[in-house]
Image: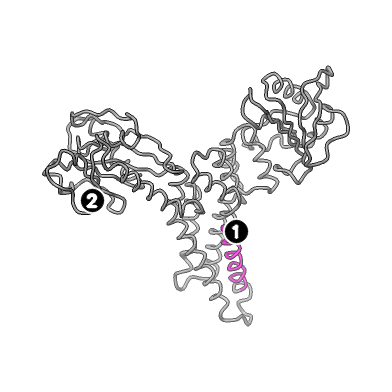
């Protein structure tokens, strides 16, 4: 089935590119071959100079009625966001002004309402953006924290694209060297030719593996640092969640097993998105509903970038870690809770406090922030920021692994390079898969 984006690419599209009215200013964007003609019929000659704002009275072409006095600017192809002739009308942001001006434009030949993401799709189709930059732009308009903004700007600015193209160019050169060995097997070819190719492929494969290792950091910035509060029943997990949230987000009860499901809160910690989950107490239970809660708690543990295991310092039996809790040791910290009720001290160097009184919460919040900052230092410029990037790069690394094996023919090595190059093409969008592209561009609003 052909993409709906490709079915009418010759049309001139129009949409509101700013927030919904009423507002101080409303921006209507037009893109396509008829954009300047539409501007001409709405205004009196001459057209504004390209890339210069000009005040123009807008009139309904059918009735001559004054619609608004607006600022108009035009961009001549290919020097525009979409690569097409483009017009922007900066109107007063009243609902009637926007509606009547939009209606007048849509009555003109070859003009229609833009679909979600269609302006950006046209920019992609005209080579103005690659797919990683498109995704970065989508993330930029959705960025909720400073770290997300920095990551999105990096992607939208082409940082990942440049890295991927560098890898692709080096693999293409290795492919050319390998093809030389295949095509000129009987010729006098330098002995170090395949060695040069192997060195280049090895360097690219190592860089790709490093990017895959940083994938968790990229995800943590884009999707948020995931923190799971875990532990035995009735150790104060829900109270700790409420203390970190600064509000009553979870039900607190002295009855063990009150929490049956995962309760999540979202925080902006000094410019970093953090998602903290309160989970069911980890224990063996015959209660079907509680058992499902335990299962979900363990799933949350595995997804988390950081696990906070809460232990009750006032409980003498809490010193030993539960043998079957399954906590990832490299991503787990222990918080000794109820220190105000305890008759003993926490282990030396351990985090301790009382969630009910707020004691120790600042230190725990700082630990979470330090974890977020450490991941952000890698994740804000990570090549991999989405699952599809990770899948494609993993496929490329798997293909290049053949170059590390002895006795593999040049034909097979060349085929491995072809597979790796195609995987990179999928990331930047050089290899079009229309269904995937439609999904990505629908993430945008109408005016983008």
Foreground: disc 1 or disc 2: 2
Q: Residue furthest right?
A: 45
Residue at point 23%, 53% (across, down):
349
With respect to residue 312, does 111 lie above or below?
above
Residue named by callout 1: 165
What secondary structure characterizes most of the magenta part? helix
Which quadrant, please, contains the C terminus? top right
The answer to whether residue 230 is magenta is: no
Spatial distance from mark 1 to mark 2, Cα to Cα?
Answer: 47 Å
Residue 341 percent across, percent down from the top left:
15, 38
Residue at point 71%, 21% (across, down):
97
Residue 70 shows up from this direction: yes
Residue 313 percent across, percent down from the top left:
17, 43
State which region is magenta.
162-180
Of the two numbered discs 1 and 2 on the same chain, state the one appearing first in sequence: 1
Residue 426 percent across, percent down from the top left:
56, 51
**Quadrant of res 99:** top right
Residue 23 percent across, percent down from the top left:
64, 25
The answer to whether residue 163 is magenta is: yes
Q: Secondary structure at mark 1?
A: helix
Tell me the tag on residue 350: 2
**Callout 1 touching callout 2 (CB < 8 Å):** no
With respect to residue 72, does 215 lie above or below?
below
103 horizontally vs 344: left or right: right
């Amino acid at each position: 089935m052909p993409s709906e984006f490709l079915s009418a690419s010759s049309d001139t599209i129009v949409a509101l590119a700013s927030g919904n009215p009423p507002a101080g200013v409303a921006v209507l964007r037009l893109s396509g071959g008829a954009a300047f003609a539409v501007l001409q019929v709405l205004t009196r000659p001459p057209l504004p100079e390209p890339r210069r704002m000009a005040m123009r009275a807008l009139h309904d072409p059918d009735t001559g009625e004054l619609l608004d006095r607006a600022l108009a600017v035009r961009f001549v192809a290919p020097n525009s966001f979409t690569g097409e002739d483009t017009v922007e009308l900066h109107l007063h942001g009243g609902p009637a002004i926007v509606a009547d001006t939009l209606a007048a434009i849509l009555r003109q030949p070859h003009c229609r309402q833009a679909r979600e993401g269609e302006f950006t799709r046209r920019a992609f189709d005209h080579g103005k953006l690659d797919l990683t930059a498109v995704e970065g732009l989508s993330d930029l308009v959705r960025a909720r924290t400073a770290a997300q903004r920095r990551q999105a700007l990096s992607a939208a600015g082409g940082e990942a694209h440049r890295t991927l193209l560098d890898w692709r160019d080096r693999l293409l050169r290795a492919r050319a060297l390998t093809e030389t060995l295949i095509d000129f097997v009987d010729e006098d070819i330098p002995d170090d030719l395949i060695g040069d190719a192997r060195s280049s492929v090895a360097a690219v494969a190592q860089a790709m593996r490093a990017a895959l290792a940083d994938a968790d950091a990229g995800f943590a910035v884009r999707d948020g640092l995931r923190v799971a509060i875990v532990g035995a029943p009735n150790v104060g997990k829900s109270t700790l969640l409420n203390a970190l949230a600064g509000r009553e987000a979870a039900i607190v009860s002295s009855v063990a097993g009150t929490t049956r499901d995962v309760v999540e809160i979202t925080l902006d910690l000094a410019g970093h998105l953090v998602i903290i989950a309160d989970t069911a107490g980890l224990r063996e239970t015959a209660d079907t509903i509680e058992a499902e809660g335990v299962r979900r708690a363990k799933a949350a543990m595995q997804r988390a970038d950081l696990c906070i295991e809460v232990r009750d310092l006032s409980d003498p039996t809490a010193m030993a870690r539960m043998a079957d809790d399954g906590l990832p040791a490299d991503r787990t910290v222990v918080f000794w809770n109820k220190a105000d009720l305890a008759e003993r001290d926490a282990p030396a160097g351990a985090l301790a406090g009382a969630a009910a009184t707020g004691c120790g919460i600042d230190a725990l919040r700082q630990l979470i922030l330090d974890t977020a900052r450490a991941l952000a230092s890698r994740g804000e410029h990570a090549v991999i920021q989405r699952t599809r990037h990770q899948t494609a790069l993993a496929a490329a690394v798997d293909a290049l692994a053949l170059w590390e094996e002895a006795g593999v023919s040049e034909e097979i090595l060349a085929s491995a390079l072809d597979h790796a190059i195609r995987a990179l093409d999928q990331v930047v969008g050089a290899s079009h898969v229309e269904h995937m592209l439609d999904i990505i561009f629908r993430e945008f609003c109408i005016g983008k």
